Structure formats: structure tokens, C-alpha cells
Image (cartoon, helix red, strand yellow):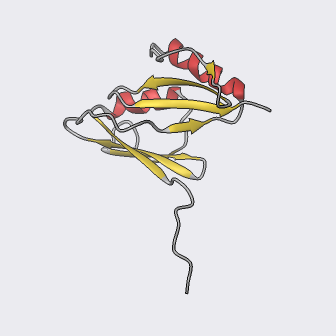
Amino acid sequence: MPEAPSIVSLDAVTLEVEDMAASVAFFNTLGFDRIKFGGADSPFTSYKVGKGHLNLQLVREVDYHSWGRPIFHVAKVSDVDALHAAAVAAGYQPDFAPTDAPWGERYFHIQDPDGHEISIACPLPD
């Protein structure tokens, strides 16, 4: 009997946005710089993120409800602080300063222009 299929990775997170240009500027500030498709003037934008993707879908009105948050890892612990500083310098307001979590990550949360909570994180060295 063959093995049952299993999920092996997260390929994409798609966020609904009301202003694509504002959302692209926000994610570019946070280091999402590999646009695979679309852009500020497009109704759909897809960023390459590691082996996966972050998609932005333009809608007339975002239906806000809590569903969780995508967590994006960066390459170095210091990158967490650098992206936090870049966000603040660009006028965005992260929810809190970078913090070392008891579960072994340095991270911060920030909301995109449409209210989606985003987590930027990096595992702490042992």
C-alpha cells in the first residue's frame, strides 16, 4: 500500500490588500525585494521568499478578521534589528521593539497597511 501524501512545506501566504502601492512599499522596506510577478501598479503581486512566496491580492474592501500571522525568518539575528530600524525610519510603527523570545527567536511584529500582522524573526544561536 502506498504512503499517504503529506504536506512538506509552506509555499505561499496570500494577503488581501486595499492599496497595492502602499503594500509593496511596506514589504520592500522589510526586505521583501524579490518580486516575481506584479508590483505597485498590479492587482496581484508575488514575492519570492526562500523556497516559498508572499502574495498580495488587491481587493475593493478587506474583510478584517483574526486568522493568525505569517512568520518570516531572516538570515541573521542582526537582520531583525536592521529591518525594525528600516521600518521605523520609513514611518511604520512596529508593535514592539525586537525581542529575544523564550522559545529561541529574536522577533518583532508589525502590521501591514491593511492590518495583517507580520512577524519578522530569526532563530537565536545556541
Screen quadrant of the N terminus: bottom right
Q: Position of residue 96 (x, y in %)?
A: 51, 15
Q: Position of residue 117 (x, y in %)?
A: 42, 29
Judge whether 112 appears above or below 47 on screen.
above
Q: Residue furthest right?
A: 126
Q: Nearer the viewer, residue 31 or 118?
A: 118
In the picture provided, is 31 more to the left or to the right than 20? right
Q: Position of residue 81 (x, y in %)?
A: 64, 20
Judge whether 1 appears above or below 33 on screen.
below
Q: Nearer the viewer, residue 120 or 5?
A: 5
Q: Could you tell me which residue is drawn at 64 percent across and 21 percent down? A: 82
Residue 84 figure quarter: top right
Judge whether 20 appears above or below 80 on screen.
below
Q: Position of residue 124 (x, y in %)?
A: 72, 30
Q: Could you tell me which residue is drawn at 46 percent across and 23 percent down? A: 110
Q: Could you tell me which residue is drawn at 35 percent across and 38 percent down? A: 67
Q: Residue furthest left?
A: 60
Q: Residue furthest bottom?
A: 1
In the picture provided, is 105 more to the left or to the right than 84? right
Q: Number of callouts in the render?
A: 0
Screen quadrant of the C terminus: top right
